[in-house]
Amino acid sequence: MTRMLYFIIMVSFLDTFIQLPIITPYALQLGASNLLAGGIVAIYSLTNMIGNIIGGHWIDRFGRKRMLFLGMLAASIILLLYPLATTGEQLFFIRFLHGLAGGVLIPAAFAYVGDQTSKRSRGKAMAITGACIGTAAIIGPAIGGIMAARSEVEYVFVLVAVLFFITTLLLLKFVKESFSETERSAVSIKHFMPLLKDPLLLQASLAAFALMISNGTLAFALPLKVADMGLDSETTGLLLSTFGIVALIVFLTPLNRMYDRFEPITLVVIGLCLIASVHIMLNFTVNSTIGYLLMCVYGVGFAFVFPSMNKIVADASSKIDRGKAYGIFYAFFSLGAVAGSFISGAAAEIIGLPFSSSATIMLSIGLFLLYFSRKTKRKL
C-alpha cells in the first residue's frame, strides 16, 4: 500500500509540474493580459489553499481514502475542461475549480504516509516522497514543454485527466483506510487552534510558504525569461526538469542520510538560501547553459527543504489531527504559490526583475526561521 501512496503523490504533483511551462503561454494564447495570466497561474493555488483547510478536517473526519478518491475523481473531470476554454476568463474559472478539487489530494496522501511511519523512519520516508515529487518534476515539465512546442498543448490536459482516472481506480483496489472509524470519533474541529499555535508546525508552514514563493515565481517568470532569450517552451520544460533530476539524486543516494543526521530546520534554512541565490542570478541569465547550472543549484536547495519540512509536520501531529496539520501546512504551500505569481508579475511590470522579490522574501524567511528555532530551543 505504501508504494501505491508514493505513486499517488507522484501523479498529484505531476498535475502541477506538467503545467508549469505551458499555463502562462496558454493563457496569453487565449488573449489574456500579463496581469490576467499571473492571476490564472495564481488562482489554482488560491483555491487550492481553501481546499487544503476544509479538506484537512474532512480527511480526519471522513477518512484518508474517501477524501483522496473524491479529490482525484473531481480533478480528472475538471482537467477535461481545459481544452474547451476559448478566453482567458474561462481558463481562470477552470483553474478556480481545479484548485478546489485538488486541494485535498496532497494533505490526504501525506497524512497516509505519516500514519504508516514512525519517527525513526520518517526522514527516509519523506525522502522517498521527495523522490516521487522529483520524478514528477523531471517528466512533467519536459512532457508539457515538448507537447506545447509541437502545438499539442490541449492534449497535455487530456493526458493528465486519463492518468488521474486510472490512479483513482488503482486507489480503490489497492489502498486501505489507515484511520479507523473508532479513531475518527475523537476528531474535532477544535483541534485546529492548538495546531495553529504549535511552533514546529509554524516553522514548517513558513518554509512551505517560502518554497512556493519560489515555485510560483518560476511558473510565471521562467517561461517569459526563456522567451526573452529567444528559446521556446521546450527549453523551459527541460530547465525545470533539471532541478528535479538533481533533487532525485539527493533523495535516492546515500546523501539522504542527512535527513536523520541533521536538524530539519537547519536543512530548511540552507535550502532556502540556495534557492534565493538562484533567483537573484536568474534575473541576469543570458543563455541556457547558465540556466541549467542554476537549476542544478535549485535542485539541491529543493532537496534540502522539502523532506525536512514534511518531517516536521508529521512529527508535530498525531493521527487524529494529522489531516488538519497537513491541511494547514499545504495551505501555506498554496498561499506561497499565489503570492509568488502575483509578486513576480508586479515586479516584472515595475522594475523588470521578477525574480528579485522572491529572493528577498526567501532570504528573510530563512533568517527568521533560524532565529525563531534557536529562540524556541532556549525556552525548552
Image: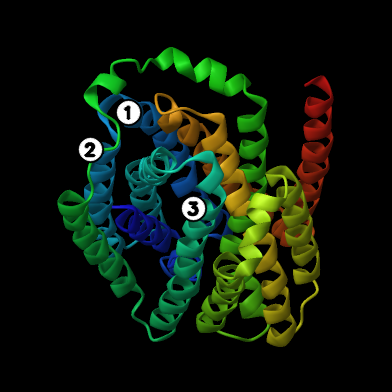
- Mark 3 lies on residue: 125
Q: Position of residue 109 (x, y in %)?
A: 37, 46
Where residue 59 sits, quadrant-wise, is top left
Asked if the residue under mark 3 is in contact with the one under mark 1, i.e. CB atoms within 8 Å, the reply is no
What number is the disc on residue 58? 1
Horizontal side of 91 relative to 43 (left or right) equals left
* Distance CA(mark 1)–CA(mark 3): 24 Å
- Chain-order first, disc 2 or disc 3: 2
The residues bearing labels 2 and 3 have C-alpha atoms spaced at a distance of: 23 Å
The disc label shown at residue 66, or none: 2
On screen, 223 above or below 68? below
Q: Position of residue 261 (x, y in %)?
A: 70, 52
Inter-mark Cα distance, 1 to 2: 9 Å
Q: Is residue 350 left or right of residue 304?
A: right
| Position in image of residue 20 (x %, y %) | 50, 65
The residue carrying pointer 2 sits among few (fewer than 14), some (14 to 19) or many (20 or more) residues within 10 Å by Cα, namely some
Residue for point 78% across, 45% down: 366
| Residue drawn 52% across the image and 77% down it | 237
Q: Are marks 1 and 2 in contact (CB under 8 Å)?
A: no
